[in-house]
Amino acid sequence: MQNILNDIILSNKKCTANGKVASYIPELKNANIDDLGICVIDKDNNIYCAGDYKKKFTIQSISKPIILAMALMDNEWHHVFSKVGMEPSGDPFNSIMKLETNDTKKPCNPMINAGAIVTTALIKGKNLQEKEERMLSFFRKLAKNNSLEINKSIYESEKLTGDRNRAMGYLLKNDGFIEGDVEETLDLYFKQCSIEVDVVDLARIGLLFSNYGIDIETGERVISENISRMVKTFMVTCGMYDASGEFALRVGIPAKSGVGGGIMASVPRKMGIGVFGPALDEKGNSIGGLNILEDLSNKLELNIF
Ligand code: GLU
């Protein structure tokens, strides 16, 4: 496995030159475009890392499946899906269009920004501080890493410039999909996106979903089997922005990407995978990350279809 990962990183390193680092959140511009790293943790808890695996980056939209799991644990499912849909949007992650043109005006799914703002509003807690503490401790539990923290400068950068998300938040409140204080919901949303991780953290989280919510080391059930299944299903249908169909065909692994350059992938009953490469394609997916996952899927026959 180690040799396979070393080879895959080496052969895909050059394609990072074809992408661009996200810049619409000003602080993300500081990433190093050439970085490329991977971690695989298999079902026997063997950990394999290659490339720039020590680099830290913000989780960004990879927080969305985790917040979905939390919203489903905090609420009745029918309540959650009365506020957010189950269908791919086919639009960019930050599109506002279907909130007006859909018959129901409901966000299409929880993997796009509008849907994730809704699931964030469903997180329970008596005030913002309690919600933030609950959220961070859930991320830490999934990653089995108590040192996960919010990157303050990225959070502030995003909060300062996140007017498109702010617009969506107010529209969603107006149409009855979120209740309570919009600014508080957005604050929690910006914070979840700014949690700093590395590829090992992502592989751990992917492994938990791949093992249907049971921690393989302790045997503890962290997330129900059904919720784990739902989250992986959303990852397949909506996890890779509006390139989810092509990714399902080329790679065939449940995965979720973020504009920080990370991808968290979960191969049912086999392994969790974290990859990082901040050079993004025009849809917002890591160029190196996509190629690495395609090569790995082919080499190890990981395609679930
Ligand atoms: N924080 C980012 C935003 O809301 C997340 C986008 C992403 O990673 O897809 O714009």
Image (tube, rainbow, N blue to C red):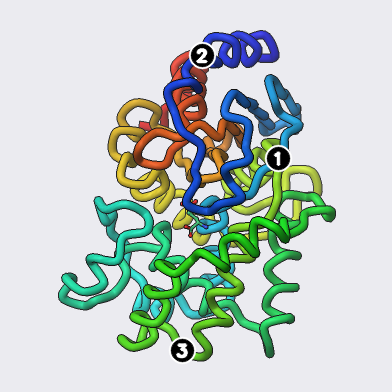
Q: Are marks 2 and 3 in contact (CB under 8 Å)?
A: no
Disc 1 residue lies near ligand 1 with CB under 8 A = no
Look at the image and tell me in which quarter the N terminus lies: top right
Q: Look at 34% across and 26% down and name the residue there.
A: 250
Instruction: Tell us which disc is closer to us: 2 or 3.
Output: 2
Mark 2: amino acid: Lys
Q: Amino acid at mark 1?
A: Asp
Q: Is residue 200 above or below residue 84?
A: above
**As displayed, is residue 256 above or below residue 234?**
above
What's the distance in space between the residues labelled 2 and 3, CA to CA? 47 Å
Number of other residues with Cα within 10 Å of mark 3, as a class: few under 14, some 14 to 19, many 20 or more = some
- Point out residue 12 in the picture as x, y percentages from the top left corner: 52, 15
Query: Which residue is label 2 attached to?
Result: 14
> Horizontal and vertical percent for residue 185?
54, 78
Residue 179's label in the rendered image is 3
What is the C-alpha distance between the residues marked 1 and 2? Answer: 21 Å
Q: Quadrant of the C terminus?
A: top left
Q: Residues within 10 Å of mark 1 (few under 14, many from 20)?
A: many
Q: Which residue is mark 1?
A: 198
